[in-house]
Amino acid sequence: MLDKMPDPRAQFRLHHDIEAPQVDAKAFRQGWKVSTRLDGLLRDEMITPGAWQAAVDFRATWERAFGIGLGASGELLGSRTSNAARCSDGKLDALKRIRGISRKLGPRRMWLIERCVLHDYPWLRTAEQLRVSDKTARSWTAVALLDLWRCVRSGHIHIWPSMSEP
């Protein structure tokens, strides 16, 4: 059945790293998966599975706070909440959590995390804005994500748990 699944279009592959379906002892993924820059940091062992999970949980908290979903490549997908739910306690709590994370990590690390986790910007684009190499931008982002994970693990910041696994 998996060999009958059509490959993603060539144009899409030009702009995204794609992982083929995988059904074996390690994974059960029946569809194609867009590999994000966050996934690449984990794959290249620049971050730990715990830091990857903290980043995914951060994204879930951000989505809950702002009521906006993100596509695989970080594009905004529109509101996930109704007008009546826009000021819910869950949203206000998520906004407080994002504000607390921002205070704890500071603007530079938050900026790096948002570009990687929320928007999946290319490393070169981030590097140009920082006036550093893409390798340096990637390394700084990995350090910011490890700092996020340490803060979560130590209990200094709280984020919404997601249901994702690396």
Image: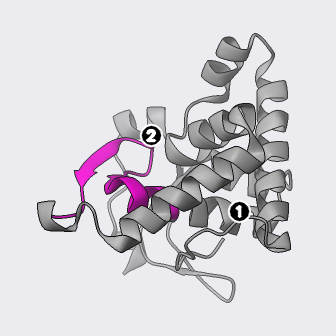
Say if the magenta span includes residue 73: yes
Q: Amino acid at mark 2?
A: Arg
State the residue at coordinates (53%, 59%). Answer: 96
- What distance separates the C-alpha of mark 2 from that of mark 1? 24 Å
SS at circle 1: helix
What secondary structure is found at the residue carrying circle 2? helix
When asked about the image quadrant of residue 128, the answer is top right
Indicate the amino acid at tag 1.
Trp
Contact, CB < 8 Å: mark 2 with mark 1? no
Circle 2 crowding by C-alpha within 10 Å: few under 14, some 14–19, many from 20: few
Relative to 15, is 63 above or below? below
Instruction: Estimate how packed mark 1 is, as few (under 14), some (14 to 19) or many (20 or more) residues with alpha carbons within 10 Å.
Output: many
Residue at figure coordinates x 64%, y 34% from the top left: 111
Disc on the earlier residue, 2 or 1: 2
Where residue 79 sits in the image (x, y, percent)?
23, 54
Question: x and y percent of residue 20 in the render?
Answer: 52, 62
The magenta segment is 61-82
Q: Residue furthest left?
A: 83
Q: In this view of the protein, which residue sits in the foreground, 54 or 93?
A: 93
Q: Dividing the image into 4 quarters, which one contains the C terminus? A: bottom right
- Tell me the residue that label 2 is attached to: 13
Q: Is residue 164 above or below residue 97?
A: below
Estimate the x, y position of residue 70 in percent, counting from the top left.
38, 51
Residue 124 placement: quadrant:
top right
* Label 1 sits on residue: 52
Q: Indicate the quadrant where residue 148 lies.
A: bottom right
Can residue 59 be seen here? no
Horizontal relation, residue 91 to residue 100: left or right: left
Point out the frontmost of discs 2 and 1: 1
